[in-house]
Image: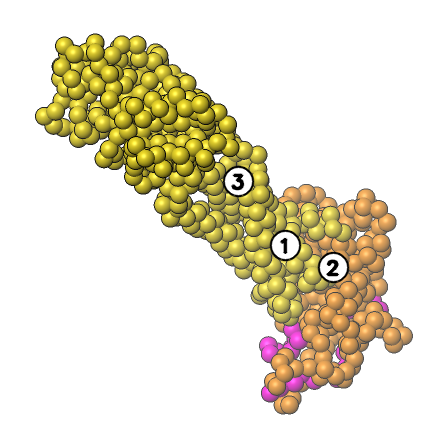
Chain colours: A yellow, B orange
Amino acid sequence: MIVDRLSLAAKSLSVRKLPVLLSLLAIALSVGLIVVTEKVRSGVREGFENTITSTDLVVGARTGPLSVVLYSIFRLGDPLQSVSWETYQLVDNHRDVAWTVPLSLGDSHRGYRVLGTDERYLQHYRYGDEQSLSFAQGGWTKDLKDTVIGAEVARSLGYKVGDTIVLSHGIVSVGFADHTDDPFTVVGIFAPTGTPVDRTVHVSLRGLEAIHTTSEQVDSIQPKAVTAFLVGMKSRPLVLRFQRLLNTYSDEPLTAVIPGVALSRLWSVIAPIENLLRGITFLVFAIGMIGLSTTLLSSLAGRKRELAVLRAVGAKPRDLLTVLMVEAIITSLGGVILGLLFAYLSLLTLGPWLRSSFGLVIEATAPGQFDAMVVLAVLAVGMIAGLVPGIAAYRQGLNESLSSDA
Amino acid sequence: MTDQSVCSMKGLRFCYRKGAAEQFVLDDLSIGQGETVILTGESGAGKSTVLGLLCGVLAPFEGSIVVGGQTLSGATGSGRDRIRADHIGYIFQRANLLPYLSPVDNVLLAGQFSQARSIAAGKTRKGRQRYAEDLLDRLGLDTINRPSSTLSVGQQQRVAAARALFGSPTLLVADEPTAALDHTNRDRFFELILAEAKRYQAGLLVVSHDISVVPLFDRHLDLGSISRWEPL
């Protein structure tokens, strides 16, 4: 008997192919969108929080912790003061310190920040899932006037390895301070990372100094200061103690920041945008659900005859309810399956492209709790949407069912 | 159950709503085994009320309704549904069929809600299928093997008759079954259904406006003579 009801519902659905298909698609789209948006949201968040990994401390001149992270990691704003070369050397040679990476910020090229650093940047800078920087073309700087550019710089300005570029002083791209005498040669282009590295023009520390000195002195150039530096400790437990040591260093005022903590705090600034994304996702989902309810409800009017015939051959109101519920569940289940398929297929196909073009890591991770919740929500709404016409059918005066002009 | 009758309605009092101004009063309506009855009446006389009461769709607040030996009056809603499924074959004025089922499946539908009629039609699925095909065959629909929605109105009504007859119910009830048919189809329909009712020894109650078919039936009842609306 159950099989009979199921096949009755399935056959009834099959005659109303178009409206059923449309509501199925509406569900599939909203399920697909909500799953993809959620993955993008968590991907962007993770990408942000993993802008820099495996670095224990970021150190700059005394200022707020967020501002150290902003200029050293995001190349945003201007540091008011720098750290002296002597202090930097002292830290670099400390027995608890495994490695350091010097960062010198100052110039810009067509709005992209110029960063002076050295090979240690290449060795120790990690992002995402402990990934190190890799080259799309070329390699690290060898000469004073060599530069390595980030993926976005290369793409938007159309630079290739071998091109020469001019670096200007300050971050305003139009001005009198163009160092026209000092063209730099692009020797390497980084692969996309989805981090500020993509928007950075890297030169050697000495190269950066060279921009600001006359050419005769080039051989004797020695950096006098760095803007900030990254520190990796020999062991994790040493981090907090060393941070305190730096923050209380009396010879020069310093600020040492644990990057993960600062990044989480920065993210909370962007949280409203994240909530907006969530809100939009929810709306899309709600629209899909309303579509499902509408289809089921509007189909009821046209099906009074059908239900009357079933009543006349002896169907109980319960039987009609079963048929309508089975239909609603078939429709919503079909929509959910199609939607998940759509979501994961697009993640699988677009994922690698997003990664290679934008360094955005949106992974088609295995369906998790969120997906399960979406599935349950759709089924629940589908069942409620089926219940409403079902109850209407249940209540439909029986006399109405038997009268011929129903 | 009174000796030979397949249904009897006695001393009924019914009103549509609590606190309604009028009540429907029906003295006596009984149909014997194999008896064919035509019920006529003016509009508003209460034909659909009689049908609703007889099929267990409406419940009287006084009086007794017995169909196939089972008391409808006083039974629960689902009890009345079961009695209807087991004992009554119902034919609407039009649009009797589920368009997405084949004519044979439409006939088989009558067995889906009644175990008694299902078993009476055949113990196996195949047997029931044969039974339905034979019925359609006798009603002149032997070559019909296409979607129900493409049948002519006359054919549809005969499929509906076949469904009503499926599993030999005690009582056939038809509400103006030929209202949508032309004269040729109307005569043919009555000829067939009257013969089948006799063959199955089922009672047949047809409600109709059409006085010209009255001579075909065993008995003619005028609703006005057995019932009336009374103020409450």
Q: Is mark 1 on a helix, strand or loop?
A: helix
Q: In this view, does B86 lie above or below A82?
A: below
Q: Give the range drawn in magenta.
A: B21-49
Quadrant where the C terminus of chain A lies?
bottom right
Tag 1: amino acid: Met
Q: Which residue sits furthest right? A: B3
Q: Give A54 or A269, whichever is nearer the viewer.
A: A54
Could you say which disc has been placed on residue A325 in the image?
1
Please check the rendered image and state whether residue B47 is part of the magenta-colored stretch, yes or no. yes
Say which residue appears at 25% left-offset and 19% top-offset: A223
Q: Is mark 2 on a helix, strand or loop?
A: helix
Q: Is residue A45 above or below residue A150?
A: below
Q: Which residue sits furthest left? A: A176
Q: Where is residue A336 in the image (x, y as percent from the top left)?
A: 56, 43
Q: Position of residue A32 (x, y in %)?
A: 49, 40
Q: What element carries label 3?
A: helix
Which quarter of the picture shows residue A92?
A: top left
Viewed as shown, does residue B200 lie left or right of A182?
right
Label 3 resides on the chain identified as: A
Q: Which residue sits furthest bottom? A: B231
Say which residue appears at 75% left-offset and 57% top-offset: B113
Tag 2: amino acid: Ala
Q: Give A169 or A372, whichever is nearer the viewer.
A: A169
Could you say which disc has been placed on residue A339 in the image?
3
Q: Does the image show residue A279?
A: yes
Q: Where is residue A206 in the image (x, y as percent from the top left)?
A: 25, 16
Tell me the mark number nearer the camera, choosing from 1 and 3. 3
Q: Name the residue under label 2.
A: B164
Q: Where is residue B78 in the image (x, y as percent from the top left)?
A: 74, 67
Does mark 1 fall on the same chain as mark 2?
Answer: no
Determine crowd level at label 1: few under 14, some 14-19, many 20+ residues with C-alpha closer than 10 A: many
Q: Give B200 or B123, whichever is nearer the viewer.
A: B123
